Image: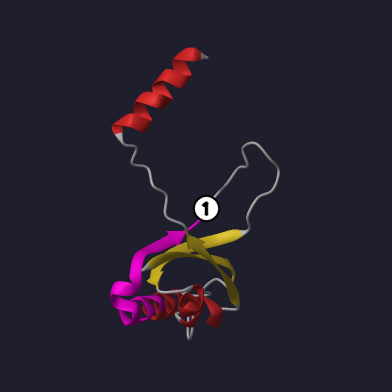
């Protein structure tokens, strides 16, 4: 099963405490419906800076889900509370990285760095 990052953009803010509770209840019901497909419920995103470039995301929050494909991840957005608030969701696959190095590769890397 693959992991997908949901990046949230836009959407309206709750206008009252009652509205805020209704929005939170909708999110909790959505996450409850997804069950074990949720890898990380995520959080809103706050202040940001750009290091090494000028392009900055306008993302306002994120979640991480498990799905068999990009299309299945997209289907998980049906009745998503962020869409109900006028926002949009960008879905990105989180690609696996093999960080394990066997001893031979590690020794070779050390030799190469010592030769430099």
Residue 83 belongs to the span the image colors magenta = no
Instruction: Identify the image quadrant of the N terminus.
Output: bottom left
In this rendered view, identify the residue nearer to me: 70 or 28. Answer: 70
Side of 81 relative to 54 (left or right): left
In the depicted view, which residue is nearer to us: 109 or 17? Answer: 109
Q: Residues within 10 Å of mark 1 (few under 14, many from 20)?
A: few
Quadrant of the image occupied by residue 50: top right
Residue pushed farthest top? 115
**Which residue: 43% across, 60% down?**
43
Question: Is 39 covered by the magenta stretch?
Answer: yes
Q: Position of residue 17 (x, y in %)?
A: 43, 74
Pinpoint residue 55: horizontal percent, then vertical percent. 69, 48
Task: Give the answer, above or below, for where 103 lies relative to 90.
Answer: above
- Residue at 40 percent across and 76 percent down: it is 27
Q: Position of residue 78 (x, y in %)?
A: 48, 85
Quadrant of the image occupied by residue 11: bottom right
**In this rendering, position of residue 113 left or right of residue 51:** left
The span shown in magenta is 27-45
Q: Tell me what residue is drawn at x 37 percent, y 79 percent.
A: 25
Observer-nearest of 4 and 30: 4
Identity of the residue furthest to the right in this view? 54
Q: x, y percentage for residue 106?
A: 36, 29
**Residue highlighted by disc 1:** 46
Helix, strand or loop status at disc 1: loop
Is residue 18 depicted above or below 46 in this figure? below
């Amino acid at each position: 099963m693959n992991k997908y990052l949901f990046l949230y953009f836009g959407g309206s803010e709750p206008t009252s405490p009652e509205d805020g509770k209704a929005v939170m209840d909708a999110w909790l019901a959505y996450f409850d419906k997804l069950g074990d497909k949720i890898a990380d419920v995520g959080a809103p995103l706050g202040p940001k800076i750009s290091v090494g470039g000028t392009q900055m995301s306008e993302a306002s929050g994120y979640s991480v889900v498990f799905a068999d494909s990009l299309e299945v991840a997209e289907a998980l957005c049906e009745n998503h509370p962020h869409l109900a608030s006028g926002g949009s969701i960008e879905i990105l696959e989180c690609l696996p990285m093999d960080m394990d190095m066997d001893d031979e590769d590690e020794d070779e890397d050390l030799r190469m760095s010592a030769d430099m």
